[in-house]
Image (cartoon, rainbow, N blue to C red):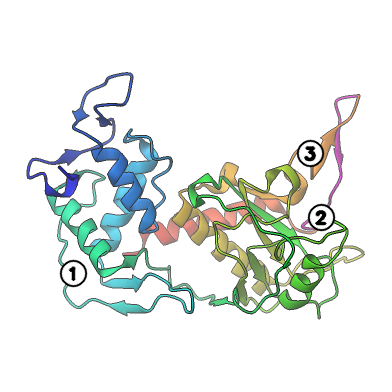
Amino acid sequence: MSYDRDPQLRLLEGSRDEKVRPNQTPNVPDQYVQDLQRDLNALGYAAGKIDGWFGPRTGDAVRAFQRDARGPRRQEQASALQAGRRFTEESPVYTGEVNGVVDQATALEIRRWKEHRWQRPDSGGSFPIEDIRDRLPINPNLTARIRQPNHIDRLVLHCTDAPPTWGAMACATYDVHPNHISARGCPTITYTYFVNADGLVQKCLSHDVVSWHAGDWNFRGLGIVLAYRATGNAAPPPTAQLEAAAELFARLCDSLGLLPVPNVVGHRELKGTGYVIDAHGQVKLRKECPGLKVNLNEFRQETARRLTSLKASP
């Protein structure tokens, strides 16, 4: 039986599928929790690893879904050609609690969203996101690795360290041709999001595409870049740019189930690619990226503030 057809359904934190060991109560039949996790991930709610255990991350995903289900905002899943249409549903069907418990009402609402091909609506914040994935060049001789978005546990802030006229197209063109990273070029642009000086955010890659932005951290990290020349610059990035980046990071934390601490980092904070420990046990920077004028602790605090506001919104 599917979990959404069980009239006695009550999945909550601590529940495990029967085949998950060690055995623990409350215990549920078959693959109820795995199926729930798979459905939540598909709808854009980061339930974590599909392991059949209803842990805190799955609980957060359920509560996020319940909040959205009680509200009127809806968004269709994106197609290969265009972003998903956003709209308002006049009379949302789900009137249950926002409590992280999956009863039959919540399960039926999840099924309704699947049938309508809806996904988690974006936050609708003040900073727009322009989807330019289909406009950017790729390397015809290389194929990017693919991952599940729930493998992402780091949001990495970079800077282009290039002149202000260097936009996403120039960045992608440089990246897919022979460059400082590889004599063969990279498979794609090295960043998933490009944040311009005026605050315009551009989506360059899908979250499942592994880009070459942070060495050994590529597979687990999502790269976001500021169009900002850090070298020789006595000024920090423009306020509009930093605010747009913090808003973007908050949305990504919310959708991927991450926290500003420890999941938001600057490139220079990544061991191996950003810094190394020398023979005397001292930290030695290999990168200043995203620029020493970017206060990463303040950036995380602003991201956290926006994330709290986002979660509190109806």
Q: Label 2: few (<14), some or many (≥20) within 10 Å?
A: some
Reading the image, the residue beneath label 3 is 272
Reading the image, the residue beneath label 2 is 292
Identified by mark 2, the residue type is Leu
Identified by mark 1, the residue type is Pro
Q: Label 2 to label 3, Cα distance in Å?
A: 18 Å
* Residue 296 horizontal/vertical position (percent): 69, 52
Identified by mark 3, the residue type is Gly
Reading the image, the residue beneath label 1 is 92
Which stretch is magenta?
Answer: 280-291
Front of the two marks 2 and 1: 1
Instruction: Point out the image quarter for the N terminus.
Output: top left
* Residue 80 horizontal/vertical position (percent): 48, 74
Residue for point 26% across, 67% down: 71
Q: Earlier in the sequence, mark 3 or mark 1?
A: 1
The answer to the question of whether label 3 and label 1 lie on touching residues, with beta carbons closer than 8 A, is: no
Q: Earlier in the sequence, mark 2 or mark 3?
A: 3
Left or right of 49: which side holds 73?
left
- Quadrant in which residue 302 is drawn: bottom right
Q: Secondary structure at mark 1?
A: loop
